[in-house]
Amino acid sequence: MNIKEIAITSNLRKKIQKAVKNTSIIFEDENGDIVVNVTAYTENTAHTGRFPLEEILGEDVLDYDVEFWIFS
């Protein structure tokens, strides 16, 4: 599995959880980390034209070549 871990603050955690609610894209693991399925996220953004994570984090933080982003 190809993942990228990204450290975030609690304020960013709340913004991410509020911005992305689709459970096929995002979920919280047993450690409390937020896990985002990159393929599902990019398909959704292509469909909706919205890019909530890029707006919150900036495009330079995200690596689209991985399977999952883990925000901790």
Image (cartoon, rainbow, N blue to C red):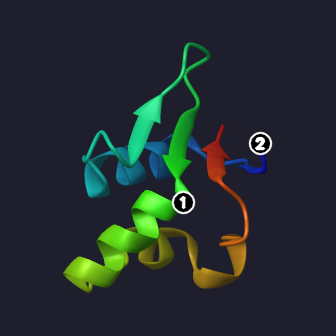
- Mark in front: 2 vs 1: 2
Q: Is residue 65 depicted above or below 68 in this figure?
A: below
Q: Is residue 30 depicted above or below 47 in this figure?
A: above
Horizontal relation, residue 53 to residue 68: left or right: left
At 35% from the left and 45% from the top, the residue drawn is 17
Q: Quadrant of residue 48?
A: bottom left
Residue 9's disc is none
Q: What secondary structure is found at the residue carrying circle 2?
A: loop
At 25% from the left and 47% from the top, the residue drawn is 22
Q: Nearer the viewer, residue 39 or 15?
A: 39
Q: Amino acid at mark 1?
A: Val
Residue 21, horizontal then vertical, whole percent: 25, 47
Q: Which residue is mark 1?
A: 38
Q: Which residue is mark 2?
A: 1
Residue 55, horizontal then vertical, whole percent: 43, 78
Q: In the rendered view of the protein, which quadrant contains the N terminus?
A: top right
Q: Amino acid at mark 2?
A: Met
Q: What secondary structure is found at the residue carrying circle 1?
A: helix
